[in-house]
Each structure stands twice: as structure tokens, then as C-alpha cells.
Amino acid sequence: MSIITSKSNNLIKKTKKLLQKKHRNDSYLIEGWHLFEEAVKAKATFRHIFVLGEMIDRLPADQEAILVTSDILKELSDAPTPQGIVAEVVLEDGDLPDFQTGRYLVLEDVQDPGNLGTMVRTADAAGLDGVILSDKSADLYNPKTLRSMQGSHFHLPVFRQSLPFVFAKMKATGLPILATTLSEQSVDYRELDHLETFALVMGNEGQGISSETADIADQLVHISMPGQAESLNVAVAAGIVIFSLL
Amino acid sequence: MSIITSKSNNLIKKTKKLLQKKHRNDSYLIEGWHLFEEAVKAKATFRHIFVLGEMIDRLPADQEAILVTSDILKELSDAPTPQGIVAEVVLEDGDLPDFQTGRYLVLEDVQDPGNLGTMVRTADAAGLDGVILSDKSADLYNPKTLRSMQGSHFHLPVFRQSLPFVFAKMKATGLPILATTLSEQSVDYRELDHLETFALVMGNEGQGISSETADIADQLVHISMPGQAESLNVAVAAGIVIFSLL
């Protein structure tokens, strides 16, 4: 058990950099007890755990921690009121599934960290088997993504991968690819046949899915909207389609 | 047509204050051409329209505008890259419906402006008849709410009202009140009978609906989740239940 009381301590300065994507090589920061407990349950590997002195009793006995001040925790978090713990979690790469079976959510260039995190959380709630992010999607380890994800990335695998490669693998195994579109020149989600396995593709907030994805999809899907809004928020649309497929 | 080039102009200083809730008495600011065009379509009353000089051609001929610099537009907006127009819109109070009929979304103490805006947008997309916000819900005219709402408040009425008063009116006309809960001691949304009219209540992000609302509701509803997430984002949950009720 060590103690750090200065914001200019080298480890604090180095750790603070992990709030920025360009400095996240093989680890990221989580903030708050809920996320920390989810990480422990998921047997995540911690590089460092920074805890407020008065909260040390909440830490499992087998975890080595560094006691810090609330000023230091504020340095290590972008939350307005950090909850007493920040941990550096080591990234673990998993192998992409073989897509012989399973139900997947694919996010093509989703830009907003809140939308991305919310969709991973929804995929988790629905019991899907994994989420695949395109190369250009928002960062999974952005503090905003982590907040809206609420630890769901500890429950189901999330991969970042080039989509043409992923779709080729899915095509090879015959996994049906559904892609959502705003065009009513497609099937309404209520009319979809029940599918035991699928990959559901949600597109970018402004542009939707790419024409390449539309071409490769086995089925284009839309949500009929009786009202005046031009579109739904992408995470809401994902929730509606995913839960209707269960 | 007048021109303002200084950020310290009194009108600019006064208008900038409208970005803060405490200064919004009878008007609010919208930013960007999409929202402005929605406001024009909805015949909103503008107090002032601030436009970037080079974009003046996009303005309808019958609208009086003040030409400003991009620096001034940045002052009047919290968007990182304002799109060339900011307008001060006069608030208009509508009368609460009599609830003899219709389909309504009721938000009880929803705290996050993004969630609130997204749910108004979803209610609009679904063609609902209105949204009612409890006194303690986030502000409808917060810039973040306005961004996620995408102009939907110009398409359907949104009221801020004390919920006991609203529920009493609904009870008097027999409008069925559905309230969502995390408890599985309630009906799964898939098992709801078809309802021609309803009020669907969504609760606070952390606390859910209040016990008073649970008591007054005609039906408690939950979304069965086969996965591990403890809950869904409130706006995603609202989307799933609303679209299943259509």
C-alpha cells in the first residue's frame, strides 16, 4: 500500500494521459465503484488502483491499491465528481468469433461515444454474443463511452475490426446480415422473420450505413415512423430492432 | 438589416445569457439551420436572428436578421462549430390537453438533457400526441436537449407540469397510465394489450419512477432482459416500449 499526495507525481502525470486516446496503448482508466466492481467480476487485470484514503475498506483485500487525495482523483477522471476510485485496466484482445452461430451487433462509423456505449449496453441487456466496431467508430475506452456502457464491455466481447473482413467471414458461414436504413425501400422491422442468428448493422449518425454495407447485407430493414421526426436516435433505433428480434 | 461586429455589444451580451437556464424567462436560443428551418415551419416567433454575413442568402426574404461574425456566433452557442445561424425564439405556453383521448409520454424527473431530448424525438417519431415533463426534469431549452431533440418540440406539444395534477386529470378521464419499472413484479411489455390511448411514464435514470407514481399507475411494465446488464438506458427503454405500443 503506497500513498501519493502530489498531483505532480510522475505516476499520476503518466496515468492522467490515459484520458486521451492517443496515449491509450495497452490500458485505459475506469472511474467509480460500479465499473470497478464489474471489472473485478470480469477478472480484469489492473495495472494500478487509485483509491481515496477513507474508502479503502471498500476494496477487496487481495487488491493492491495506491491511496490518493480527492484532488488527485479529479486529475485522473473527467467526471465532475469522481466517486473515490480510478483504476488502470489492461486491455485484452480477444479472437474474432468464427460466426458459425450467434447474434451480433455491428456498428459502422458510429461517432458519438454516448451512442456507442449505449448500444453496447443494449446488446448486453439483450444477451447478444458480441459487438463489432468499424475502424472509424468512436473509441470504446473514451470516458463518455465507458460511462454510458455501465460495464457492459465486461459482459460481452467487443471487437474493433475492418468491416469488409468481418462481413466476408459472416458471408462464408451464412450468418444473415441485416442492415438498418432510413429508406422505406426495405422491410419494416416488424415484418422480419424470426432469426436464431444474425448480425445487425447500425450506421453513422449522419450518413447511415455505407453503400458497400447496403450491397453486402442480406436484408435492409427500416423502422416505420408515423410521426414527423426525420429519424430516430441511432441507439434508440438499435434498441427497438434488437428487442424485436429476441 | 443591421450588423454587429463586437462581442461586447449589449445585445450580444444579453443574448448570450440565454444559454443559461436562470436567464431564460420567455425565450431561448436555437442554433443551426436545421432547427431554424423547423422553427420557421412551426411558425415560431423570433425575437432576433443572428446570421453569418456570407449565409444571409439562406434566410427567407421575410425574416429580419442581424449580420454577425463567426466569433459572435461562437459566443451565442455552446456548439464547438456553430453552423452560421442562432435565433432567439419566444416561448409559447399551450394549454394542457383534457386527456379525453390521445397517447402521451410522461417523463418523471429525467435528469440528463440528452435523454430527455432523445425521448421527445422518439415520441415525435412515433406520432404521440404530447410529452409531459415533471417539474424536476431536465430543462427542455438546454442546448444539449435542443440538439438531441432535433426540432421535435416544434412537432408535438411538450408541457412542464406537476405530475400529481396531470395524473389526477388522466384518472378523471380514464386514460390508462402505464409506468415502466425495473421490477419483474410487473407485466412484460410484450404482454400488454393493445391500447388506443395511454400515458407511458418513464422515470429518473438512477431512481426510476417514484412510489407515488407506481401507486397511481394502472399498469406497471418492465422489459425482460435476457443478458447481464442491470438496466437499459432510459431513452432506449422508452423507444422499445413506445414502438411496441404502436
Image: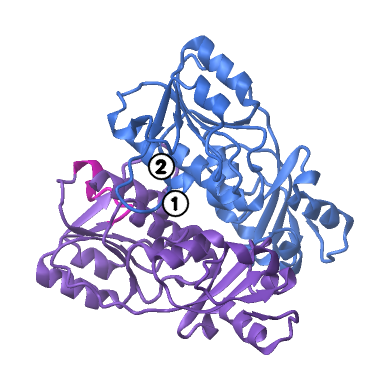
Chain colours: A purple, B blue
| Residue B9 appears left or right of A156 | right
- Quarter location, residue B194: top left
Host chain of mark 2: B
Label 2 with label 1: CB-CB less than 8 Å:
yes
Badge 1 is on which residue? A233
Q: Is residue B176 above or below residue B224?
A: above
Residue nearest the observer in this picture, A146 or B67: A146
Badge 2 is on which residue? B239
- Quarter location, residue A116: bottom left
Asked if residue A181 lies in the magenta stretch, the reply is: yes
Q: Position of residue B102 (x, y in %)?
A: 45, 22
Write the start and end of the magenta stretch as one range: A180-191
Tell me the number on the disc at residue A212: none
| Residue A80 appears left or right of B116 | right
Instruction: Name the quarter where the N terminus of chain A is drawn.
Output: bottom right
Asked if residue B142 lies in the magenta stretch, the reply is: no
Host chain of mark 1: A
**Any part of residue A222 in sight:** yes
Q: Amino acid at mark 2?
A: Gly
